[in-house]
């Protein structure tokens, strides 16, 4: 009888891969909004995988920042540009073929190598790792944390400059 | 079978391959950008899995930083796409060949 967490892992992993596939290569729709919606589903099921890995804080951040803020920004831009159904242009057969072969080889090699790898013994981390995470974030990683806030400020100024009416 | 480290790594590798395929095959700039996000997420999953199985929190801190940088990157990238669209009225990579040759 498999444990609930094992079943949940396979469910979330399957959902992540299925929604990821539908995001990049949806056979039914070329609409960017559909892709964005499936990317939201991918991100939320990855938050489920994070919970199974006991990274509760990151799961919350994943849902809040990625599914909440970043994807809303994506959808906002898609609607702002009013991009309709991508009209089907002639595919460059050779390019798609070579790309598919390259990606398939990469996936095959990765999967094969990992499948035959020596399994690592499972080590239990401290439960509810949010408190130790916060501790090292504000002691050992204090300088990168502060630098990151400057990066966000720079990005904000850059975006305002880029989206002005007349670009000089 | 209880999922071990390599199960998570396989999921992450497949997700990364999907993102790479999206970048190579799709020609809408916004969808290419979303595929890039997919690849970043695959890398994040690897870091969290290693952090869990090696009992080391530094990987999770790294993922926290990556998510923040990705948010900044998305904001700047989308602003660039909007500026480009205003000039060219297109978000299709085949219409943006000014720098080619």
Image: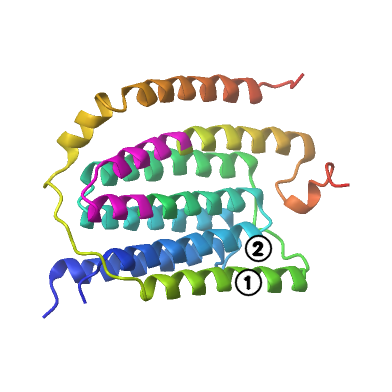
Q: Is residue A129 visible?
A: yes
Q: Quadrant of the C terminus of chain A?
A: top right
- The extreme front residue here reads A118
Q: In which chain is the residue bearing label 2?
A: B
Q: Quadrant of the N terminus of chain A?
A: bottom left
Circle 2 SS class: helix
Q: Which mark is residue A100?
A: 1
Task: Answer few, some or many: residues within 10 Å of disc 1's Cα (few below 14, many 20 plus, some between 14 and 19).
Answer: some
**Residue A140: x, y in percent?**
27, 27
Would residue B75 be counted in the magenta stretch?
no
**Answer yes or no: do the residues labelled 2 and 1 have beta carbons within 8 Å?**
yes
**Residue A111: x, y in percent?**
43, 72
Say whether residue A98 is left or right of residue A27. right
| Among the 4 quarters of the image, the one containing residue A32 | bottom right
Q: Nearer the viewer, residue B21 or B59?
A: B59
**Residue B4: x, y in percent?**
25, 67
The residue that label 2 is drawn on is B25
Main SS, magenta residues: helix
Q: Nearer the viewer, residue A141 or A64?
A: A141
At 54% from the left edge and 54% from the top edge, which residue is drawn?
B35
Q: Is residue A43 above or below residue B83?
A: below
Q: In which chain is the residue bearing label 1?
A: A
Which residues make up the magenta segment?
B46-69
Determine the CA span between mark 2 and mark 1: 8 Å
At 22% from the left edge and 67% from the top edge, which residue is drawn?
A8
Circle 1 SS class: helix
- The extreme right residue here reads B101
At 35% from the left edge and 70% from the top edge, which residue is drawn?
A14
Say whether residue B7 is left or right of residue A90. left
**Residue B88: x, y in percent?**
78, 39
Which colour assignment does the render follow?
rainbow
């Amino acid at each position: 009888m498999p444990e609930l967490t094992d079943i949940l892992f396979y469910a979330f992993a399957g959902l992540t891969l299925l929604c990821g596939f539908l995001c990049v290569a949806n056979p039914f729709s070329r609409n960017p909004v559909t892709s964005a919606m499936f990317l939201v589903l991918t991100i939320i099921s990855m938050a489920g995988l994070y919970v199974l890995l006991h990274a509760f804080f990151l799961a919350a951040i994943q849902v809040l920042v990625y599914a909440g803020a970043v994807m809303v920004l994506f959808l906002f831009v898609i609607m702002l540009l009013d991009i309709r159904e991508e009209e089907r242009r002639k595919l460059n057969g050779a390019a798609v073929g070579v790309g598919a072969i390259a990606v398939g080889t990469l996936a095959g090699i990765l999967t094969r190598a990992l499948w035959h790898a020596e399994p690592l013994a499972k080590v239990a981390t401290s439960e509810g790792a949010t408190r130790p995470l916060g501790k090292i974030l504000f002691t050992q990683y204090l300088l990168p944390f502060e630098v990151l806030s400057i990066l966000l400020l720079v990005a904000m100024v850059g975006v305002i400059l880029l989206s002005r009416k007349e670009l000089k | 079978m209880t999922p071990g480290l390599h199960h998570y790594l396989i999921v992450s590798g497949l997700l990364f391959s999907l993102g790479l395929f999206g970048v190579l095959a799709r020609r809408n700039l916004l969808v290419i950008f979303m595929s890039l996000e997919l690849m970043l997420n695959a890398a994040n999953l690897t870091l969290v899995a290693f952090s869990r199985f090696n009992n080391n929190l530094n990987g999770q801190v790294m993922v926290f930083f990556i998510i923040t940088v990705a948010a900044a990157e998305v904001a700047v990238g989308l602003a660039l796409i909007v500026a480009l669209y205003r000039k060219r009225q297109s978000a299709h990579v085949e219409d943006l060949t000014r720098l080619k040759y």
